[in-house]
Amino acid sequence: MQFTFDFKDLVKGRKVYWVEAQTGYKPPACRFLISDQEVKHLPVQLYDAAREDGPLRYVDGVWYWNHNLTGEFLLEASLLTSECRKVDFIRHHAQFCAIGGCSDQGKEGDGAAGRVIAYILSRKTDVIDAPLVVTAPKKVLSSAVERGLSRICMALGAISGKLNGPLNSNTSVDAALRAAMLQYAEGERNAAVETVKLIGSDDIFRKRLGSMVEAHFGVKSEVMAS
């Protein structure tokens, strides 16, 4: 999962300090500290972004980075996901993971998209709603949301035409669907599939999921409408 922030938002009201260069990296890495705190006790230097020979430059209100180098920025502040500009689900590195013991290494982002969107809808959380909706040239759901919805339908068996459970009313289906999505988001896919089997049909599943999406994000899903 990738969160995209605007660099100028991160440095606003703060100063940029040079920390060190890691020449053993390929490509070499430049480390910076971004802070609004007192740093006299740290082995850092105030960075001049106006210099033409530096890896990080600030010219006419725009920040630039030398793409031939790796940039590592240490932000001495809370990085709030609610302030990000875009959310994507990208392919996980095949070998490296910062948290360790990760089962997503080498996988595309569809699985993560499904679990995250399922969690958002089941828990009705709106922390990252803004970056999940595209507003120009018209208001639509981002590709990240649409990918997540497609994955939910596939993972929970709502594309096979085999759902034939006893639940048909909006209230009962919504309750089962939210429970199943939360189970799926928490990694309990088999349990989620069993819960979904209570729903009357694939069409009912998709109709209610589409309604949930529209109620949550304020815009219809093209995937759920197809």
Image (spheres, rainbow, N blue to C red):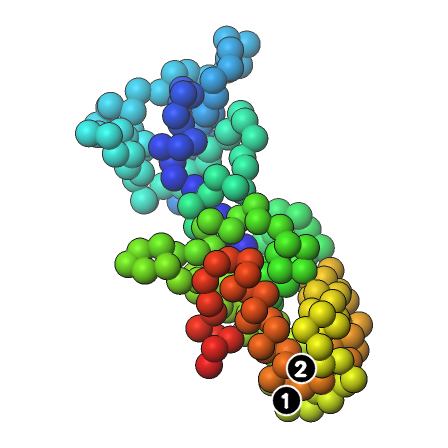
Give the CA separation, mark 2 to mark 1. 6 Å
Tell me the element at label 1: loop
Residue nearer the viewer, 78 or 214: 214
Give the residue displayed 43% in from the left and 41% down from the top: 5
Q: In the picture provided, is 154 more to the left or to the right than 68?
A: right
User: Total label count?
Assistant: 2
In this view, 207 is above or below 180: below
The foreground one among 167 and 21 is: 167
Check disc 2 and report its element: helix, strand or loop.
loop
**Residue 160, numbered circle:** 1
- The answer to whether any part of residue 94 appears in the image is no
Q: Residue at x 36, y 41 (%)?
A: 69
The disc placed on residue 157 is 2
Which amino acid is tagged 2? Gly
- Checking the image for residue 205, the label placed there is none
Asked whether, in this view, residue 199 is left or right of residue 225, the answer is right
Tell me the residue at 51%/11% (across/down): 38
Q: Is residue 150 above or below residue 70?
A: below
- Relative height, residue 18 to residue 162 (above, below): above
Q: Residue furthest top?
A: 40
The answer to the question of whether label 2 and label 1 lie on touching residues, with beta carbons closer than 8 A, is yes
The three-letter code of the residue at mark 1 reads Ser
Residue occupying image coordinates x 69% and y 91%: 162
Between residue 35 and residue 133, name the one nearer to us: 133
- Where does residue 61 sit, x and y in percent of width and height? 24, 30
